[in-house]
Image (cartoon, helix red, strand yellow):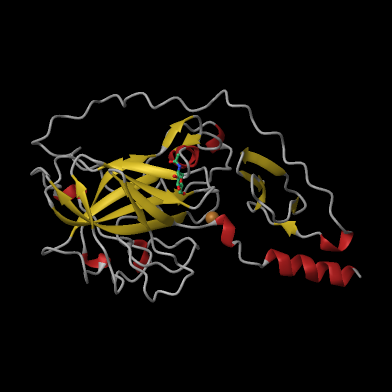
Amino acid sequence: MFAFATLVALASATLPRVFAHGGVLAYSNAGNWYQGWAPYDTPTGQTTIERPWSTYNPITDPTDPQLACNDDGTPGALQLTATVEAGSAITAYWNQVWPHAYGPMLTYLAQCPGSTCDGVNSNTLKWFKIDESGLISGTIYDGYWGDGQMIAQNSSWTTTIPATVPSGSYLIRFETIALHSLPAQFYPECAQIDITGGGNLQPTAAELVTFPGAYSATDPGLDVDIYSNAAETETTYVIPGPPLYGSSSSSSPAPPTTPSAPSAPPTSAPKPPPTSAPAAPSSSSIATVAQYGQCGGQSYTGPTTCASGTTCTVLNAYYSQCI
Ligand SMILES: *[C@@H]1O[C@H](CO)[C@@H](O)[C@H](O)[C@H]1NC(C)=O
Ligand SMILES: [Cu+2]
């Protein structure tokens, strides 16, 4: 009997936690809705502005070629391209409800040679960062992050295409990085856009990076143990990647030295009550969650019993974790 229960626990613990991960499923710009690639449907017949991708699992190796666009970079057979006005806002929608509230949000552009990104391998491009949000307030351990804001914004992120970007064919790469476990988890996705009405500020050499290449596992913003004692008081976080586009250009006005006040995080939002483990239907169905695994949160239906020595702790309404 004991052996059987142990077996059940092991089997449950090794099930893929598909619903703890995901990617960008759709985009919107200027009132247009663009359904994204569906990674678990047959590729045949799919037509979308998003580059194909194949799994909800995160990338955890910064040298993985898939870090560029979550695939080998080849466009789909019926690849579309959205026309996007420089200066307009484009929104990427992740799975509802995105589970990871700790880590930065980043958006990059890469211009393709020639008049289309069709057929262009994303690993050959130079990328520049046009948007980033790291630790907005509080501490590394339990502060309000770009990722938390993404969740609060309908699990979506909106980036404005800088009006100064030259017109042309680009890949836009939205990325959320999750720091709740090490190694850090990267969730990048790319879409093809033609930027119109642009300006003439080329990114500087210092602002241009490749994927892979832009990140290293030892970057201070990636090699972060958010559960360390130091993290409980640390309020500074260094966002990985190159300096923001426009920030190092001599021809552009110096950026303000004080960051504009971030929109106030919902500090007074009532904390959800601690997840009370629902009564187990029978004693033989108890599976335990390993340290740093998910054990609760809205719409979570997996095991809620933490491995001995760890406690199920509410991180936010959507995510409780064995710590
Ligand atoms: C929230 O995101 C979903 C897609 O995940 C979208 O269909 C819906 O319109 C969005 N709601 C708002 C208010 O933007
Ligand atoms: Cu996940």
Q: Quadrant of residue 18?
A: bottom right
| Residue 270, x across and y down, in percent | 63, 27
Q: Residue furthest right?
A: 1
Badge count: 0
Q: Can residue 217 be seen?
A: no
Q: Can residue 29 be seen?
A: yes
Q: Is residue 189 left or right of residue 290?
A: left
User: Which residue sits at x=45%, y=67%?
Assistant: 39
User: Which residue sits at x=21%, y=43%?
Assistant: 245
| Residue 84, x across and y down, in percent | 21, 49
| Residue 226, x across and y down, in percent | 54, 43
**22 or 67: nearer the viewer:** 22
Q: Is residue 132 left or right of residue 16?
A: left
Q: Is residue 46 left or right of residue 290?
A: left
Q: Is residue 276 above or below residue 34?
A: above
| Residue 276, x across and y down, in percent | 77, 41
Q: Is residue 26 above or below residue 319?
A: below
| Quarter occupied by the N terminus | bottom right
User: Which residue sits at x=45%, y=57%?
Assistant: 23
Ligand 1's quadrant:
top left
Q: Is residue 62 left or right of residue 178?
A: left
Q: Quadrant of residue 49?
A: bottom left
User: Which residue sits at x=58%, y=38%?
Assistant: 229
